[in-house]
């Protein structure tokens, strides 16, 4: 299947879009020349992206997601599933009140901002409406429960389920079956990993 024509951007402007990747008709890419989408990945309709985005292979970004970050980059690994409504926020105001806030404000009047890349490793699962703040790095196999908040000061462990505001560890996850399935897929479709 091929991506349908997009209402907001000519997909030929995307820096790298694998032929097997699908970008929904109403996905908004504000900086398409800074977006890379790997084999078999899907970005569902009504997703808004205003920063650099690097999506691995066989990753799904659900509908109504927001990925923002000014000049930052959000990097998402292989076999990641991001449920509808998630917010990946790589840039934010610092809320100290030392200036005006928002993208319409001239720089000389603006308050300080926090801009820091977000990294999501392979096999990560984000439940619906999860919020990821600037500077977060999610290790391999992490799962974040619905409506949770993850900030950069959390020390996250691989293959662990977290939930809450802020997110707290609930239990370990097993990854053997997922890793084995991924290896089989990589062998079967080796051309997509070259």
Image (cartoon, rainbow, N blue to C red):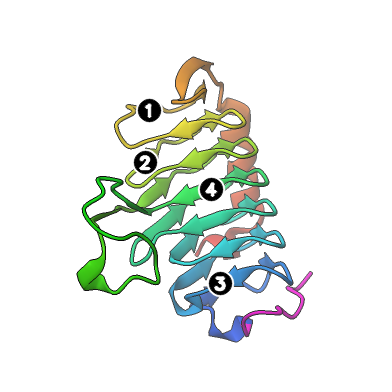
| 28 w.r.t. 100: above or below | below
Of the two numbered discs 4 and 3 on the same chain, state the one appearing first in sequence.
Answer: 3
Q: Residue furthest top?
A: 171
Q: CA distance from mark 2 to mark 1?
A: 8 Å
Front label number (2 vs 3): 3
Packing grade of label 3 (10 A; few <14, some 14-19, many >=20) is many
CB within 8 Å, label 4 to label 3: no
CB within 8 Å, label 2 to label 1: yes
Which stretch did the figure color magenta?
A: 1-10
> Which residue matches tag 3?
29
Asked whether residue 118 is in view, the answer is: yes
> Is 74 included in the stretch rendered in magenta?
no
Front label number (4 vs 2): 4
> Which residue matches tag 4?
87
Q: CA distance from mark 1 to mark 4?
A: 18 Å
Element at badge 3? strand
> Which residue matches tag 1?
156
Please report the residue visible at 58 percent of the width from the left and 43 percent of the height from the top.
183
Q: Position of residue 145 (x, y in %)?
A: 59, 28
Q: CA distance from mark 4 to mark 2?
A: 14 Å
What numbered label is drawn on residue 137? Answer: 2
């Amino acid at each position: 299947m091929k991506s349908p024509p997009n209402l907001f951007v000519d997909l030929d402007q995307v820096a790298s879009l694998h032929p097997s990747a699908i970008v929904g008709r109403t996905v908004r890419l504000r900086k398409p020349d800074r977006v890379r989408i790997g084999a078999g990945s899907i970005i569902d309709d009504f997703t808004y992206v205003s920063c650099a985005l690097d999506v691995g292979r066989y990753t799904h970004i659900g509908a109504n997601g927001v990925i923002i970050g000014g000049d930052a980059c959000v990097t998402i690994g292989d076999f990641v599933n991001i449920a509808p409504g998630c917010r990946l926020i790589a840039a934010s105001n610092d809320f100290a009140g030392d200036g005006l806030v928002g993208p319409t404000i001239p720089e000389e009047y603006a308050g300080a901002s926090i801009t820091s890349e977000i990294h999501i490793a392979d096999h990560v699962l984000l439940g619906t409406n999860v919020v990821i703040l600037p500077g977060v790095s999610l290790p391999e196999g992490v799962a974040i429960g619905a409506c949770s908040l993850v900030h950069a000061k959390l020390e996250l462990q691989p293959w662990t389920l977290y939930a809450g505001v802020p997110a707290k560890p609930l239990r370990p996850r097993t990854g053997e079956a997922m890793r084995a399935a991924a290896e089989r897929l990589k062998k079967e479709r080796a051309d997509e990993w070259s």
